[in-house]
Image: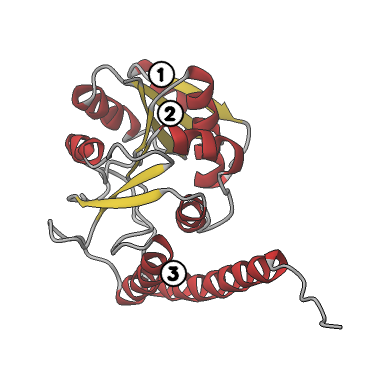
């Protein structure tokens, strides 16, 4: 099976080469594609020197926009599997095999999430951010019809049907790339799985987490969920056939 590993990267020149090498060691037959998402450092150059293919966005599109590029490249190349791995080193490439083993033979789009908080290791997360993740996981578990614990994880695998689906419709808005993408799969009749993985601290640089930012994240999650529920309710209502009056 043809596989491509997509690394969305923004100003990750200090880590991207390490991650590229780890991915190459874990899945030597896969294409490694770094989407340099408007970096102002040498991210793209360093990734290319490490042996990755590089697509450079002229300005920052966010993770969703970078992944949309990756899905379109995968569709054009005829890839059967697309793996998403962060370029900061938090995802352990040796766990890629766990994600690939979770696919089943059912038709339709499938997404496998490498999940924290699923019984294998743990990573420190501020209380407000963890609360937001719990709320999101409860909501998405109902939508997907399976228990999920880490729906914001960017460590994911997608089959060919999911590649074709997301090449046309992958959401690029904040939170939508992780959350709404799972809703899209569920509403397309697909399946969402998760497997427990271990996460690591960033290999370099500073994490974006802080109590203040975590509180803002929680607020954004609540707003996103409210909008998502409203949008799904509106779509359901608009799709209902009009009532006919009896004569």
Q: Residue at x 42, y 31 (%)?
A: 160
Q: Nearer the viewer, residue 153 or 236?
A: 236
Foreground tag (2 vs 1): 2
Spot occupied by residue 210 in the image (x, y as percentages of width and height): 37, 68
Callout 2: SS: strand
Give the numbered dot on residue 213: 3
Question: How far apart, in angstroms, are the residues tagged by discs 1 and 3?
Answer: 33 Å
Q: Quick one: label 3 or label 2, which is nearer the N terminus?
A: 2
Spot occupied by residue 9 in the image (x, y as percentages of width and height): 44, 37
Considering only vertical position in the picture, is 175 above or below 16?
below
Spot occupied by residue 82 in the image (x, y as percentages of width and height): 39, 32
Considering only vertical position in the picture, is 188 above or below 129?
above
Q: Nearer the viewer, residue 6 or 128?
A: 6
Please identify the residue farthest to the left as the structure is shown.
Answer: 120
Which residue corresponds to mark 2? Answer: 34
Query: Would residue 42 be seen by someone viewing this image from the given angle?
Result: no
Question: How far apart, in angstroms, are the residues tagged by discs 3 and 2?
Answer: 27 Å
Which residue corresponds to mark 1? Answer: 48
Q: How is the image coloured?
A: secondary structure
Callout 3: SS: helix
Q: Residue at x 20, y 27 (%)?
A: 26
Q: Residue at x 46, y 35 (%)?
A: 161
Q: Is residue 125 left or right of residue 237?
A: left
Question: How packed is label 2: few (under 14 Cα within 10 Å), some, or many (20 or more)?
Answer: many
Callout 1: SS: helix
Question: How packed is label 3: few (under 14 Cα within 10 Å), some, or many (20 or more)?
Answer: some
Q: Quadrant of residue 7?
A: top left
**Do the CB atoms of the residues marked 2 and 1 lie less than 8 Å apart?**
yes
């Amino acid at each position: 099976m043809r596989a491509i590993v997509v690394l969305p990267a923004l100003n990750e020149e200090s880590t991207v080469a390490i991650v590229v090498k780890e991915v190459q060691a874990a899945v030597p037959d896969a294409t490694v594609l770094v989407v340099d998402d408007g970096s102002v450092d040498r991210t793209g150059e360093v990734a290319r020197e490490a042996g990755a293919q590089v697509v450079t966005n002229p300005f920052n599109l966010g993770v969703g926009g970078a992944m949309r590029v990756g899905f379109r490249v995968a569709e054009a190349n005829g890839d059967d599997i697309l793996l998403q791995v962060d370029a900061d080193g938090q995802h352990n490439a040796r766990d890629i095999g766990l994600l690939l083993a979770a696919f089943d033979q059912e038709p339709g789009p499938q997404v496998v999430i490498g999940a924290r908080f699923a019984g294998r290791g743990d990573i420190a997360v501020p209380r407000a951010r963890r609360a937001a993740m719990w709320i999101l996981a409860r909501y998405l578990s109902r939508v997907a019809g399976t228990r999920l614990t880490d729906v914001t994880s960017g460590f994911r695998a997608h089959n060919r049907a999911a590649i074709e689906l997301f090449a046309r419709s992958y959401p690029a808005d904040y939170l939508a790339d992780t959350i709404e993408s799972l809703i899209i799969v569920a509403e397309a009749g697909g399946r969402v799985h998760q497997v427990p993985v271990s996460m690591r601290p960033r290999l370099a640089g500073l994490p974006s987490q802080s109590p203040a930012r975590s509180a803002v994240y929680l607020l954004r999650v609540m707003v996103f969920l409210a909008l998502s529920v409203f949008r799904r309710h509106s779509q359901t209502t608009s799709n209902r056939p009009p009532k006919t009056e009896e004569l």
